[in-house]
Image (cartoon, rainbow, N blue to C red):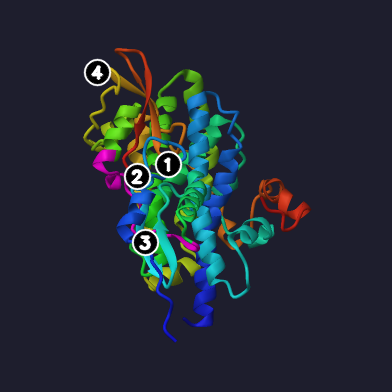
Amino acid sequence: MKHTDQSRLQKYVLRLGDNGLILGQQVSAWCGHAPALEEDIAFANVALDLIGQATNWLNYAAQLSTEKTTADKLAFLRDEREFSNVLLVEYPNTDFAHSLMRQFLFDCWHYPMLQALSVSQDKTIADIAQKSIKEVAYHLERSTDLVIRLGGGTEESHKRMQDTLNVLWRFTGELCTADELDTHMMEGGIGPDLTAVDEVFQNHIQKVLPLAMLVLPETALMRSGGKAGIHSEAMGPLLAEMQYLQRAHPEASW
Amino acid sequence: MIAPCKNLPSNELIWDWLSAVPDPEIPVISVVDLGIVRGVSWEEDVLCVDITPTYSGCPATGVIALDIEMALLKKGLETVKIRSVLSPAWTTAWISEQGRRKLQDYGIVPPAEGDTCAGMISLTGAKAAKINCPRCDSSDIERISQFGSTPCKASYRCKNCREPFDYFKAL
């Protein structure tokens, strides 16, 4: 593999890993705090899956790196600008409605994304995607189920789900908008055509929202930047918490 | 120079040994019954055991690798290499018949065909999985949560005998 190709592939794999890592970190914060025991356990399980998947992606990114590095170093010693996760996953937990809607929107995209990556020309990417998609099928089931139940629940739960959809929808444009790296990977048969992923994403949302008695906001100014390392103000505190131990005690291990 | 003759145990014997290594979370079932061990082979006199994680983030994976290594070292092997393989991805279809029986007897319903999520069933028209209470065999059950005490299980309750139970999710 040419040097430039390998470094672009590494960048792309990091991007796949960063989404799971950052969302996993956020979701894990619900452990011990969710409104019901079952939801607490469910969110902890989802976080575990996402962090496990991120470990697989970051291990591969470390292998592809020209410098000697590890998945742990990539997770705990990179700075904000080097993270390429989408803005949606770094949106703060705020409350249960926000965290659940964020999960639902992410799952709706994550599933078709992994479906497409399962047939990647890159064998390791395909292997990790084929493994992850089985887990993500359960995430999508759960978040779909809960969005329908809470959207169609009480007046209060409906209002909170609608409010959070209005806030979070503007972070979904970035998910399926291809940048130069996405396009390059698609042309090489490594990454998906994001317009096809978008179609599945929109279809699922269009099917679920009427059942949940929710509607998309009429106008939304789509935000983007995460893929390029331009993050929202939530990212700094998030990383400070996630990376604290390795920054304070470099090389600390179990 | 002629290499010294070594009496390496047969692969069959090694599979027997591995069949006695319990899963750390569900000790009634062995790592072989769960389908985690994918192969054993020799590199010179180093035994290589290929294992595959059940769920990507399952915390038991590290413990399982250690348990397998310890069990084999106890049998007198000197060097054991545990290799993790991701592909093909683990599926609950690899749980042996014996494993399914042991799960059922232990009170964990083994994976069934079909969907277990009411929302998705109504959305996709998927076939609902048939799950009966492991204690009283009633089909009058309800799902409490798709996620349970370990990544591989969902939580259910029997409306007939009122007992909660675990279901091993199909993956």
Q: Which residue sits at x=30%, y=19%?
A: B135
In the current view of this chain or complex, which residue is farthest to the top? Answer: B161
Which residue type does callout 3 highlight?
Pro
Q: Which chain letter matches label 3?
A: B
Q: Name the residue under label 4.
A: B138
Callouts 4 and 2 in the same chain: yes
Q: Which of marks 4 and 3 is in front?
A: 3
For label 3, count other residues whose C-alpha is less than 10 Å away and answer few (under 14), some (14-19) or many (20+).
few
Distance from Cα at disc 3 to Cα at disc 2: 23 Å
Q: Are marks 2 and 1 in contact (CB under 8 Å)?
A: yes
Disc 3, disc 1: CB below 8 Å? no
Give the CA separation, mark 4 to mark 2: 26 Å
Classify residue B111 by image quadrant: top left
Q: Marks 4 and 1, how far apart in space?
A: 28 Å
Q: Which of marks 4 and 3 is nearer the N terminus?
A: 3
Is B94 inside the magenta-drawn segment? Answer: yes
Number of the front mark, 4 or 2: 2
Residue A209, by quadrant, is top left
* Amino acid type, callout 2: Leu
Tell me the tag on residue B9.
Answer: 3
**Amino acid, disc 1:** Asp
On the question of residue B68 being in view, the answer is yes
Which amino acid type is marked by label 4?
Ser
Residue designated by label 1: B23
Callout 3 and callout 1 share a chain: yes
- Discs 3, 2: same chain: yes
Q: Marks 2/1: CA distance?
A: 8 Å
- The region drawn magenta spans B78-98
